[in-house]
Image (cartoon, rainbow, N blue to C red):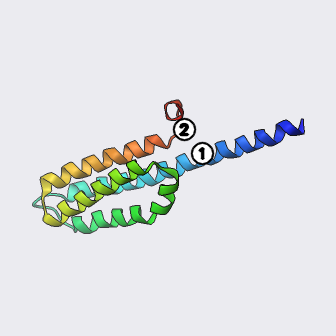
Amino acid sequence: MRGFLFPCAVLAVILGATIANGIYVTSLCDGWIEALHTIEPQIGPNAEGDVSGAVESVYGDWSDRQRFLHIVVEHDELDEVESLFARTISCAKEDDAHELEANIAELITQLRHLKEMEQPRIENIF
């Protein structure tokens, strides 16, 4: 019986860590998505506030989590988000409202995809 309990305990720990990781990555992505949604109303000719600074603030938070994310998430997905952040920051600095809106929408979509990839679902297992 003892030979059966140890492997079950190891599997339970791995399952718990996987679920905890999914919850943590989901909460991170939700925070970034929420922050990007708050930036959207600031875009445009009558906008108030520093859009470039707000985008860079979200990117700074993203950058602070890179070490962890590179351990648990596919690098291709992280590279795509990184590229989108670079394009979004560039558009924000150039005050290109139309392109900035498009890049923020694409960045939000990619963050949602990243979040979905880390959730414990059957389609993510197979």
Picture residue at 9% right of the left edge, 60% below the top = 45
Residue at left 30%, top 52%? 37
Q: Secondary structure at mark 1?
A: helix
Real-space Cα separation, disc 2 to disc 1, in angstroms: 8 Å
Q: Is residue 46 above or below residue 73?
A: below
Determine the residue located farthest toward the front in the rendered image: 76
Residue 69: image location, x then y, percent: 48, 56
User: Which residue is tagged 2?
Assistant: 120
Residue 13: x percent and y percent?
A: 70, 46
Q: Quadrant of residue 49?
A: bottom left
Is 82 situated left or right of 99 in this image?
right
Packing grade of label 1 (10 A; few <14, some 14-19, many >=20) is some
Q: Which residue is mark 1?
A: 18
Find residue 66 and name its label. none
Q: Position of residue 109 (x, y in %)?
A: 32, 44
- Amino acid of disc 1: Thr
Task: Find residue 15 and report its image quarter.
Answer: top right
* Horizontal side of residue 80 vs 70, given as left or right: left
In terms of depth relative to the viewer, which is nearer, 43 or 2?
2
Amino acid found under the numbered disc labelled 2: Pro
User: Which quarter of the image is occupied by the N terminus?
Assistant: top right
Q: Position of residue 104 (x, y in %)?
A: 25, 52
Q: Secondary structure at mark 2?
A: loop
